[in-house]
Amino acid sequence: MEFVLSQLAGFGHAFGALVADPLTYVYLLGSVFLGIAFGALPGLTATLAVTILTGFFGNKIPLDYSLIALLGAYVGAIYGGSYPSILLNIPGTAASAATALDGHPLAKSGRGGEALGLTTTASFIGTLIGTFALLIFVWALLLISKNIASPEKALLALFGILLSGALMSEDLVVKGWIAGLIGLAMAMVGMDPLLSEPRFTFGWSYMLSGFQVVPVLMGAFAIPQIIAGMRRTQAGTLTQLNDRILPSFAAIRRYLPTITRSGVIGTGVGALPGVGEDVAGWVSYGVGKTVSKEGEKFGKGSVEGLLSSETANNACIGGALIPLLVLGIPGSPPAAALMGAFMINNVIPGPTLDPSIILRVVAILVLASFTMFLMGLFTARVFIRILRIPQTVFLPVVLILTTIGSFSVGGGINDLYLMLGVGVVAYFMNMLAFPIAPLVIGVILGGMFDEMFRRSLLLSDGDLSVFASRPGAAILLALNVALIASQLPPVKRAFGRMRQRIA
Amino acid sequence: MDEERLIMRARDFWASIALILLSLFFIWRTLDIPLSGGTQGGVKGVEWFNSAAIVPLGIFCAMLLLSVSLLVRSIREGGAARALDAAGLGWNGPEAMRFATLMAIFVFYVVALVPRVDFVISSGLLITALIFGYHTGDRGRMLLATAAVVVAGLAALLLHFPQAEWNAHGDDWIALAIWAGLVAWMLIVARGERVARITPLIAIAAPLVLICAMAFTFRQNVPNRGGLIFKQIEYHFYVTLRPLWRD
C-alpha cells in the first residue's frame, strides 16, 4: 500500500507540474484533436499519426513537449477510429474493426449518439485503467529488470519479434516471422555495434550509420496507405445522429463491469511485446461474447459488444507502454513509433530510463484522456464533419507531411529515398499479406538483439548454455522455443488430435 | 479452398522464390565478413561468437528456411499451378496501371523534384496531380496527371542534374508553368466538381504552411532552401518581418 501511495504522490507532482504549464494545453489540444481526426479518417491510422508527429516534433522541441504531442495523438487516434466504425460501418483504424460490428447496427437503429457517448466514456475509462496499470506495474517490473542481463535482453527482443509475427499475421504465421526477419536484416545495415565493422553498406557512406528509424516508420506506415487509398471510392452513407451524445450516469454504471473487464484485458494484451490495439479489441470482444449475458446479441447492435472492443483498444495504450518503458521493447506499432521519438532524442527506454520521464508519461496520459473525453463529448459533431473528407483529398497532404517530416529529421535527401524504398516494399508486403508491424519491431529491436546476443556469447567465451544458465533466460528461451514449436506441423497435428480427444 | 486463398498461394509462390534468392544473395554477402580468425573493425583475432557476421548469417539462414517452407506450402496448396496465369495471380490491369502511375509520380517527386525544385511548387504540383488524377478514377486524368509530374521531373533532371546546380531556378519555372497549366485544365474539365475548386487552395496552402512552420517555428532544415518561392519567403521573413518584433 505504501508503494502505491508513493507512486501516486510522484504522479501527483508530475501532474501538477504539467497542469501549471500553459504550453501543455497548446500541445495537448492540438495533438488530441489531430489524433482524433487521424483516427476518424479511414485510411489513416494511430501509428501514422504518431509517426508523422515524430517527424515533426521528435527532436525539434524539448522531449517533454514532444511526448505530450505524441501521446495526445496516440490516445486521440485510437479513440477516433470509432467514429467511422459507428457512423459509416468502416473502421477508421484496425483497432476499431470490432467496434463496427455493433456500433453501426446501433447507429442504424437510431442510437448513434448513445453509442458515441458510451464509446467516448469507455475509451476514457479504458485509457485510465491502462495508465493506472502502467503507473503500478512499470515500477515493479523496473525493479525486476535491473537483474536482466544481456542473454535475457537478447531473448526478450527475439520473443517480441516472434510474438508480434505470430499474432499480427492475418494469413500464415510464417509470413509474420519473415517480416520480422526482414526488419532484423534491415537493422544489420551499417556499422556493427561491437566491432564497428561495416555491413551491407555497398560502398555508400549514408548506409554506414544504418537505416534511420523515422524514414523507415514513415515509409512502412504512410506510403502503403497512400498507394492503397488513392482510388475512387464510393462515399459511405453517414448515419444521422438523432439522439444525444452525453451518456446518462445510469448507463455508465450499468456497463461499468464490462468496461472494467475490457480495460484489464486490453492492458494485458498491450503489455505483450509487439501486439497492438487491434488484437486487444478482438480478444476483448471474443471474451465479452463468451462471458456476457447478452453474448448472442453481439454483432447485432449490442452495447456490451461495442464497449468490449472500444475500452480494450484504449486500455492497450498504457499496457503497450509498460514493455517499452521497462525493457525498451514496444508493446504495439504506435509504441514503436514512440520509441523512434525516444531514440532520436537519445533517450534509451529500459532499466536505465530516468524515472521522472515515466511519471511524466503517466501524467500526460491522464491529461490526454481527459482532453479526449471532453472533446469527444462536446465537439463530436466537428469530427463527424471530418468523415466527409474524401481520401483522395487528404492523402496527398499526408504525403507532403511525411516527405518534409522524413527530410527534416535526418536533414538529407537520402532519407527520402529510404522512405520511398521501404514504402514500396511495405506496400508489396501488405499485398502479399505479410504484416508490417513485425518488420518495424525488427528494425527497432535489431540493433539491441545483435549487440546483446553477441555480448552474451563474448562474456561466456562462446558457450551457448549462457542462454539457459539463469532462471530468467531459461524461461525466455523456453517461451521462444515453445512459440516456434507451436507452429511446426507435427506439433500442430498433435494439438489438433488432443483437442479432438478432449471434445 | 476459396479463390482469394488460392490467389494468395500463387502470389506466395513468387514471393517465396524472391525471398529465397534474396536470402542466398545476402548469405553470400555475409560470408565476405570473416567468421573467425580475421580482423574486423581493427580488432584482431575475432572469434565466431563475436564476429559481425554471426547474427546476419543466422537471420538470412532463418529467412531462407522460412521462405522454403512458404514455397513448399504454396506448391502443396496449388499456388505453383496458378503462378504463371495472370488471372490466377489476381492480376488486374487497371489496378496495375494505377499503381504504376502512382509510383512514377512518387519517384519523380522524391528523386527529381524535391531536391531541385522549390518545395511549394513541387508539392503544389504533386497535390494537384494526385487529386485531379485519382479522385474520379478516370484513366485519362490519371495519365495526364502522371505526365505533368514526370515532365516536370525530367526537366529538373535534365537541366540541373548535379547537386551544385540544385539551387538554380530554370526547373522551378518549368514546374510552375506545368502546375498552372494543370490547374487551368482541371478547372475547365472539372468545373462542376467541388473538389476541383478547392484543390488549388489545398495545393498552395498545405506546402506553404508546412515549410514555413518547419523553417521558422521549428528552425529545421527544409528541402531546397534556395527555391524560387521559399528564397523570397525566407528573405522577407528575416529582412522585413523579423525586425518588426526584434526591434
Image: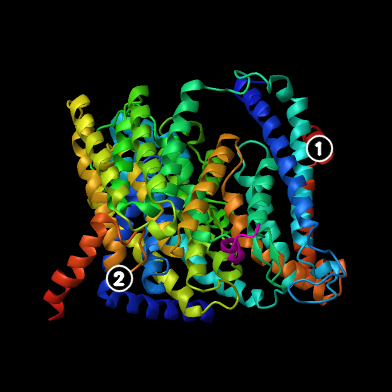
Query: Residue A93: in sight, yes or no?
Result: no
Q: Position of residue A285 (x, y in %)?
A: 51, 42
The residue identified by callout 2 is A24
Q: Position of residue A426 (x, y in %)?
A: 55, 44
In the rendered structure, does residue A205 fall within the stretch colored magenta?
yes
- Residue at screen point 63% across, 53% down: A183
* Cβ–Cβ under 8 Å for marks 1 and 2: no
Magenta residue span: A202-209
Which one is nearer the viewer's eye here, A98 or B4?
B4
In-image side of A376 versus A296 (left or right): left
Tell me how far mark 1 sits from mark 2, CA to CA.
54 Å
Q: Which numbered marker is on residue A164?
A: none
Give the chain of mark 2. Answer: A
Q: Quadrant of residue A109?
A: top left
- Residue at screen point 86% across, 67% down: B36
Identify the image quadrant of the N terminus of chain B: top right
The amino acid beneath tag 2 is Thr
- Could you tell me what secondary structure mostly forms the magenta stretch? helix
